[in-house]
Amino acid sequence: MRIPRLAPFALVALLALAGCSGEGTAAAASRTASTDALSGKVTVLAAASLTETFDSLGARFEKLHPNVTVSTTYGGSGALAQQILQGAPVDVFASAADAPMTTVTRAGLASHPTEFATNVLELVVPKGNPGGVRTLSDLSKPGLKVVLCDATVPCGSAAQTLLQKTGVKVTPVSLEQDVKQVLAKVELDEADAGLVYVTDARSADGRVTSIAVPEATTVVNDYPIVVLKNAPNSAAAKAFAAYVLGPVGTKVLKDAGFGAAP
């Protein structure tokens, strides 16, 4: 069951009124704040690979709903799921794979998550590519410093599956707790190569060199989102989840390099 997509009807009506009356942007925003039924804080836990997109969507959502604040914490999906199990007051959970979400739903804390995006892995190397990495198989070169996500988090599980399927043997110099930590190691020249999501390589904005991995298209991570059953701000949480699933969210995710939900 998909979470209903909620259109921002109040904003549309407000803009129409503003256009007819010549009301300015500030006045329109003030009127929106006074008439919007949504208010309070929406607490979101989201996979680290969603950092840039959810920062953007949170800011856009706040403009639509001036009485709402979106507070997002990013990290490894498995660790975030454990925070929810331990009773953290959370409204929305967005995971980088199905397994962490299943941990939450099996505990009875949420139901009917909706997949909203997909992602695949890509190689990143420092600018100048000092390790001479060209393909996935190069990761098995003796002496090459490779950094991966830990297998307990989605990016690490995907990397492990990819390496097993391709028969590439890698001894990583470190295993990180989320994909942004892998990216940082490569950016800082602390590793010759790393496996991150396509979206993270793109978000680095030229600070690393990315290398496409054709084999990675066989290992796709699905991203589900859900509103928690005991969400402290259920109304605003449902509206935010619907916004992520709606046309604006879909475009922001696509522009960042995410694939469409299956």
Image (tube, helix red, strand yellow):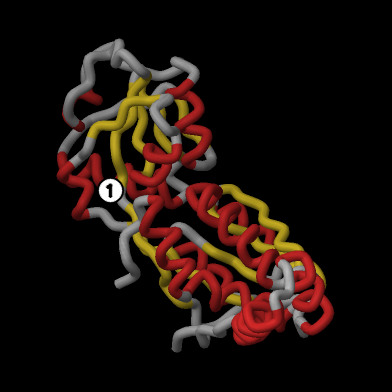
Report the quarter where the N terminus lies. bottom left
Please identify the quarter of the rendering in which residue 23 is found: bottom right
Give 9 or 193, whichever is nearer the viewer.
9
Q: Position of residue 151 (x, y in %)?
A: 42, 44
Give 201 or 92, whichever is nearer the viewer.
201
> Which residue shows up at 30% across the image and 50% down it?
120
> Which residue shows up at 38% across the image and 37% down it?
201
Q: Position of residue 213 (x, y in %)?
A: 20, 39
Give 114 or 102, whichever is nearer the viewer.
114
> Which residue shows up at 77% across the image and 65% down it?
26
Q: Residue tagged by mark 1?
A: 161
**Residues packed near mark 1 inside 10 Å, few (<14), some (14 to 19) or many (20 plus):** some
Observer able to see residue 86: no
Tag 1, which secondary structure?
helix
Observer able to see residue 241: yes
Which amino acid, mark 1?
A: Thr
> Which residue shows up at 30% across the image and 72% down it?
262
Give 123 or 156, whichever is nearer the viewer.
123
Please, is residue 68 above or below residue 175 in the view? below
Please, is residue 58 above or below residue 22 in the view? above
Q: Position of residue 165 (x, y in %)?
A: 18, 46
Q: Position of residue 261 (x, y in %)?
A: 34, 69
* Mark count: 1
